[in-house]
Amino acid sequence: MGSLKWATNNPVAKMYQMAGLDQLSDPPACPLLGLALDPRTRYTFSHPAHRCHAAGSAKKVHRGHQSAVCLSATFATCARYQSWERSLVARGSRDRAKTAGPAPGGAVGPATDAEPRSPTVIHVVRAGDTSLHPTWIAASLPRSFDLVVSYYGRDPDRYRDAPFRRIDDEGQKFNGLQRLFQREAFWRDYDWVWLPDDDLAIEPSGIDRLFAMVEALGFDLAQPALDWHSHYSFGITLRSPSFSVRCTDMVEIMAPCFSRTFLERCLPTFGENLTGWGLSFVWPHLLGTGLRRCGILDEVTVTHTRAVGGPAYDALRAEGRSPHDERSRLLARYGLPAEPHPRMLGAIDRNARWLDGRRRGDAGRLARLQARDAWAFHAERPHIESTALGRRPDPRAPPGLEESQLRAIAAGMPFGA
């Protein structure tokens, strides 16, 4: 253990010292991470014995969160830490003579009224020099997720001073992610892993909602819908305002969200080809037949800000091949048609009704609602293309379904049938 002297003009640092928290490990680490019965002692590496003492009791911390946040210089970005720090500053402002001290049972710091949940979700973005991921986090707000940047650029300093971990891996998106996930195990400590492209626009609240919906529905694979300002390839991925969730037999590779267990199963497919074309259909296929725990979340949207393309496409052209060739070969290996047509198998509408595409009455209603949404999109799209294509629209939307509603509906959905 090494001693770190706090700047005397920092009011929070003064309260840390008065609370006996001026002994920190070197390199910097969160002062609230310690052992269950000895909050001032911790290992310099992630360990299952570590506990977070931010909320008046010793709470378990995912080892991936320990490595990426608690035991790094970015610990101040943690939602629990931020909540504890705000409470500490507010308490110090009310009464400068009173500070937080060790609580019974080894807890340190004041209890908060509402303890932020320990993150069980992470998103890993393959980022270049123009990545939009810095806009996905609001430093002043708590969040329910962690972020790791898998950087494929060549700038040694890019994103180094940002409140998230940077890991370098060259190559295309899924080739690079496969190398990263085979080499490092941090992602295995999370329940869900989101793998968005770096040219997607979304607000932090949208990411929180994405993970909340996936958890409530119990999906193994999902994606947010594309808003109508997006560049797109598959019409089914565009937002359908009539629905909350659509169960589909495809999820596009630009923004897939996996359960950890299903990601482990899909990881070998990440190196199947260069562009990833075809994986959008292979992954749902691996979930089996019938209704799968897979779909598009219409309550959450992203904006795809750039047209499809990139170095992988240039490399294929130089070899006299195309992404379509890669997709056809990949789909053939899994016994899937060379020209697949994505399908909506069922949906939860905005009135919290489950509509099963195999039932005649529900199938008719699904078709009518989908057609109505498609008509509205095509009526508005020409104006969007002439004025605002690729620009994030106002993200405000009608209130979505409660998580308890989604959970109850999902409990009655005939998955696997």
Image: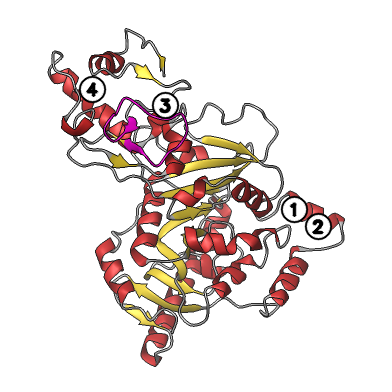
Please tell me whether mark 1 sits on a helix, a strand or a loop.
helix
Q: Name the residue under label 1.
A: 312
274, above or below 65, in the image: below
* Camera sees residue 375: no
The three-letter amino acid code for the residue at tag 1 is: Ala
Q: Does the magenta stretch include residue 394?
A: no
Q: How far apart are marks 4 and 3 (CA)?
A: 20 Å
Span shown in magenta: 33-51
Numbered badge on residue 29 = 3
Q: Can you tell which of label 4 and label 3 is closer to the viewer?
A: 3
CB under 8 Å between discs 2 and 4: no
Task: Identify the residue at the far bottom of this view.
Answer: 360
Q: Can you tell which of label 3 and label 2 is closer to the viewer?
A: 3
Q: Name the residue under label 2.
A: 316
CB under 8 Å between discs 3 and 2: no
| Label located before the other in sequence (3 or 2) | 3
Task: Tell me which residue sits at (42%, 86%) in the image.
Answer: 363
| Crowd tier of the residue under label 2, counting other residues whose Cα lies within 10 Å: few below 14, some 14–19, many 20 or above | some
The three-letter amino acid code for the residue at tag 4 is: Val
| Label located before the other in sequence (1 or 4) | 4
Please tell me whether mark 3 sits on a helix, a strand or a loop.
loop
Please tell me whether mark 2 sits on a helix, a strand or a loop.
helix
Q: Residue 111, position in %: x, y?
A: 18, 34
